[in-house]
Image (spheres, coloured by chain):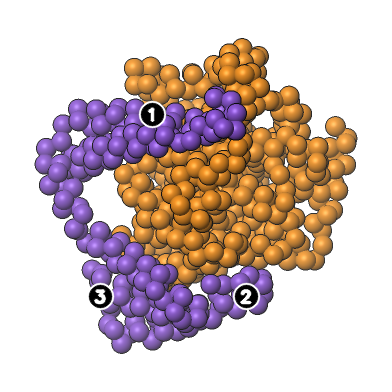
Amino acid sequence: MFDGLALLAQGVGHFLTPASLFNVVWATLLGLVIGILPGLTATMGVALLVTLTYKMPPDQAILTLMCVYLGAIYGGSRTAILLNIPGTPANAAATLDGYPLARQGRAGLAMGLATTSSTLGTIVGIFFLAIIAPALADFALEFGSYEFFWLALFGVLISGQMAGSDTPLKGYIAGILGLLVAMVGMEMLHAYQRFTFGVGALGGGIDLIPAMVGAFGFAEILTSMKRRVVAHVAAVNDRVVPTFREIFQYWRTIIRSGVIGTFVGIIPGVGEDIGSWSSYAAAKRFSKKPEEFGKGSQEGLIAAETGDNAVVSAAMIPTLTLALPGSAAAAVLIAAMLIHGIRPGPMLMVENPIFLYQVVAMLLLATLANLIFGLSLTKLLIKVLVVPRERLMAVVYVLCVVGSFAITQRMFDVYVMLVFGIAGFILREMRYPMAPLVLGIVLGDLLDINLRRGLLLSDGDISPFFTRPISAVLFAITLLTIVMSMPVVSRRVSGVFRRLVRQGRTG
Amino acid sequence: MEMESGEHALRARADLLTAIVLVALGLIVVYLSWTMPRLEQRHVHPATIPGLLPMILGLALSFCGLLLGLRSWAIQAEGGWQALGRALVSRPARRVLAVVALALFHTLVLVGWLPFWAASMLFIFTFIVLFEVFMTDQPINLMRSAPWALAIAVAAGWGISFIFEDVFLVRLP
């Protein structure tokens, strides 16, 4: 245990240089701005910035990306409170109580609460990250092809199930489409080119970053531009920094939301928005004053913001130890790490054990920066909201083109971005969730290799997939997931869950 | 979900349409994977043919598409097709198409032809003016929009080139 603390201290010390701190500052500010501006999401911000940080040394690059990620999730709560529009989907639950509070003239208090509870949420997540990740990585070293097959499959399925939408079917379809996209290109076992149709550029498959920039960047631009939006910004007149008591009278809610957010973060592909809603619903369920929820309940706001931020840190647990993205932005981080030569997965703790603690250190620094900037610069940052969307989106599109081109220097990747942007937009309009799609793309190769390698090792016999102890457990969980999504079963069980969430949403 | 029945009907019909597309796509994938070389001459184990997972995925896709289609078929959807048709030519749809058209023009035509900063400036300027003056419910005067559009286009075009190429040393198209 003291080993861990020593490594953590080393990790933090590593970043206490002027250059690193400078990166923390500008990246956090950028993240906050991205979060505040509706139409720009955390995932989009991270995806676009991967290109910018391409030439930086790996630790600085990942530091920058984490600061932007965290900053964006924080920043999104500003618009949620002031405009009733969540800056990022993760902050949707914050609108329910944040905006009424603002309308009551307590916008400053709301933002202060949001900032501090975000900080606490991240810290809870960091705590679990530091404890669980090394243990999980150790355990994962026992995993073989069979186990990884089930893990990858489970990741895609659970993401599809829970990503919310009118039916889990759409989530599964999105996941399958993502997996199919991953099938394009040279497969790893026999070096055979699949689905390339003679197009040379497809030989290497479809790169994740251009696909993400398309699906989360260009598609988002198209969605934003559908309508002209005029924003009514609530004025901020009261004190922003909350008192100690104002926060800690809800310590139970904070811890509960932090744990829920952590749990949600660990589940692959289920992101900050689910963490936020689940924490909110649970807080309402256990609150002494549930009738206040939806009308300006401070407890509700605290729950929502603690929950979504805990996800950010906890999402790094499966991301780093199993290479299974805990959220969509984490998927982009995996791609970024691979670009910089860091290989997430069980071997990470063996090859590069200090990296985990460096990530913890990054999260701590980012949290600190967000706390400071969030509390002090709030009034200044919301001036950013005056920028009309048309102007912003034009610039963002150019960034998307740059973002898809810069890493591989191929126009082909820009075309990939265009295709995924248009397809992503259509899918979104049809209520298909994007997270399972991303997970499919990230996990497709893993699923394929492990399926076939497992079969090769057992000489075509599929029983090891079901009889090896860990595999059997994973298989059972996967089966449970599918069964739960069937209307007959789920109507009973998730009726309870959905009633809680709907209660949360409509107040 | 709180949706008026019109929108509900529209979605049901749109889902039905996509379901058909998905089933077709799944079947195409199964066909392509089935006919994928089995690499026998390399003495590859039959369980590890490249087409294995794509085939399974294709089947899964068709199956899910089928379920989706059945679900959409079962939903009562009066006037769904008309609503879908209307949605496709509505103002939001035209705005989206305009964005796509402009984007494609920039990326496919302008980028190879002009230096990147020039292509981007032209794109940004056109984009802003188009959506502030023409394709909007609350148009503002061209004289008021154009100078701002120009300023932003120049600043952004130059800024992006400078930041990426000179500060971060990333080559642009």
Q: Is residue A128 left or right of residue A438?
A: right
User: Real-space Cα distance between discs 3 and 1?
Assistant: 47 Å
Q: Position of residue B85 (x, y in %)?
A: 16, 50
Q: Nearer the viewer, mark 2 or mark 1?
A: 1
Q: Position of residue A239 (x, y in %)?
A: 56, 59
Are discs 2 and 3 both within one chain?
A: yes
Disc 2 on helix, strand or loop?
helix
Chain drawn purple in the picture: B
Q: Chain of mark 3?
A: B
Answer few, some or many: residues within 10 Å of disc 3's Cα (few below 14, many 20 plus, some between 14 and 19). Answer: some
Q: Label the orange chain with its letter.
A: A
Q: CA distance from mark 2 to mark 3?
A: 34 Å
Which chain's residue wears label 1?
A: B
Q: Residues within 10 Å of mark 1 (few under 14, many from 20)?
A: many
Do dots 3 and 1 share one subunit?
A: yes
Mark 3 residue element: helix
In the picture of the structure, the residue carrying the numbered disc 1 is B59
Q: Earlier in the sequence, mark 2 or mark 3?
A: 3
Residue B27: quarter of image: top left
Return the residue at label 2: B165
Can residue B23 be seen here? The reply is: yes
Residue B134 is marked as 3
Residue found 18% across the figure and 58% down from its top? B89
Residue toward you, A446 or A160: A446
Q: Disc 3 residue type?
A: Phe
Is residue A436 visible in the rendered image? The answer is no
